[in-house]
Structures are given as C-alpha cells and as structure tokens.
Amino acid sequence: MHERVRRRREERGLPGYVLAQRLGISPSYVSLIESGKKVPGEDIARRMAEALDDDADLYAAWAHSSGINDLDGYTNRLLRLRAYASDPTLQGRLRSGEDIAASDTPPSRKAAALASIVPRLFRSKARAAEDAQEGVEPELAVIPLLDEGADPVAPANERKDAGQPLKLDPRLFADDDRGRLFAYRATPDMARRAGGSIRLGDWLILTSRVDPADTQGIFAVRSNGRIVLSPILVKGREVLLLPPPGTSDYEVVAFKNDADLGRVLAGRVVMKLRGM
C-alpha cells in the first residue's frame, strides 16, 4: 500500500509537503509512510484516500491490518468466533467450559460465516444495523458487465458482455434502482473523459433510472449508435458531453423533450469499485 500511496501522489503531481499539509501531518511522516516504515491510523488513512482520490475503505483496512502478521489466520479466527456466536449448540459448549478444538467448527459453518461477512464489507453502517435487526441476508444482485459501447437495453442475444456479471448486496442501492443496474469496466477513454474521478480498471455500476432534472455526475449517453460515458451539460435541447481535461471539443446530442432526454441518457453512475 505504501507504494500505491507514493505512485498516486506522484501521478497527480502532488509534492509530499502539500499532501502533508492537507493531512495535518509532517512531511517526514509522509516520507515514512511512503517508504513502508509507518502505517497511518484510520483517520489519516481515510483523509489520505480522499486527497489521492482513492478507495477510503481500502485505506482504512490497511490501517487496521498494520498489526496483524497473519491475515488469513486472523480471518479464520474471526469466522470461528462468528460461528460460535450464531450457533446455540456451540454457544452451550462454550459456556460449559469444555475443551473445544478448531476442527469442531464444521467447514459448512465457516463458509456460511464468510458468505455473510463479505457482503457487509460493501454496506454502510446504517444498513448493517438494519440487517442485524432483521437477521436475514438477501440474495445478491446480479449485474451484467457490458463491453465498452454496449447498450444496456439491447436484447440479451445481441448485447455484448465483457465478462461474468458482478454480484453485490442489493441493499447498496436504492429500491427503485434494483433490476435496472448494469456495469462497465473503465477503459482509457472513460478514465480520460472523467478527468480523474474514474481510474482505468474501475468497475462502474450504473442505473437506467435517470431524472432529467438531475444531470450531475457521469452518464451513459447514446451518441452515434454507441454508448459513451461522460460528464454532461444539458443546454436547451442539447446534451453536451464535456470534453476531457485539456481539450475543448464538445460532443453534442440533440433531444426533443424530457421523454426523449430519457432515451438519450441510458444511465448514470451510482457506484465505483476501485480496480486493483
């Protein structure tokens, strides 16, 4: 991770002392972090992710794992603890004081525990609290991963898929978006148009539900028979695809009314998952 921090800072032309000022730490501490000699606490790690336009949860995990030498072993111990906490029979054995071996936790229970923990990594604290009260895990949402330029409404036998669909917890998304989700893997053109908010290799989750009155963000736009992902500006009866930084060539798509604008805008980005 320390190499990633240095690389992203350098890619953005950000001097170490400027990053230090933004984080409220000394330049020498930034140097220690980038050399791998120090790992920041969670608060600084999250602020560092924001300053470098990176995944805050990834940086927080880095901060928390700094004192763990065996992540696999630590994960297995967490899974075992969860199995005992959720199984009345195992709880009874735990309270009885009898000897318990790690092998006493059936593999199937470990797998079930893992299946329930992983989705929570992609869930807000508020939703996690709701899940605990409900005690029910939903089926994962299956989100088609489309090839660059592919239209999400094309018939399944004509649609160009880029690979296996993504599977995410549906509670990550608004109820109205469920069943309307599709995804792309960010290409160089997508990253270039987004001006730094999207990186090459990111997974971009979009919904086909578009509000013509809200055109902030990155949109999938139908233009010249293809889908283009870009920030937009709606001016009169035209959608302007904003040019990449450093250029001035707008791509313009005309529309007739609000209903037609809904046809031009195939979707909007509602989530980005950082590619590694």
Image (cartoon, helix red, strand yellow):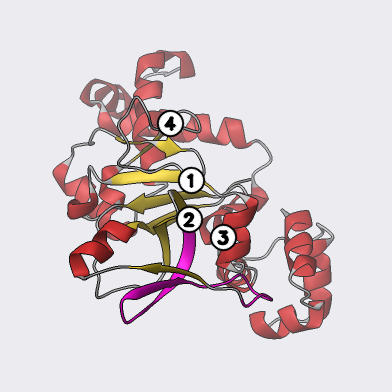
* Whole-number angstrom distance, CA of label 3 to CA of label 2: 14 Å
In the picture, measured across the screen, residue 110 lies left or right of residue 199, that is left
**Per the image, is 14 magenta?**
no
* Whole-number angstrom distance, CA of label 1 to CA of label 3: 17 Å
Which residue is label 3 attached to?
A: 198
Q: Residue at x 51, y 73 (%)?
A: 242
| Type of the residue with mark 3 | Ile
Element at label 4: helix
Residue 106 appearing in the image: no
Q: Hey, which quadrant is residue 81 in on the image?
A: top left
Q: Quick one: label 4 or label 2, which is nearer the N terminus?
A: 4
Q: Are marks 1 and 4 in contact (CB under 8 Å)?
A: no
Residue 205 appearing in the image: yes
Q: Residues within 10 Å of mark 3 (few under 14, many from 20)?
A: many
Whether 166 is drawn above or below 204: the answer is above
Element at label 2: strand
In the picture, measured across the screen, residue 196 lies left or right of residue 30, that is left
Q: Hey, which quadrant is residue 37 in on the image?
A: bottom right
Q: Quick one: label 3 or label 2, which is nearer the N terminus?
A: 3
Tag nearer the camera, 1 or 4: 1
Q: Quick one: label 1 or label 2, which is nearer the N terminus?
A: 1
Q: In the image, which disc is placed on residue 228?
A: 2
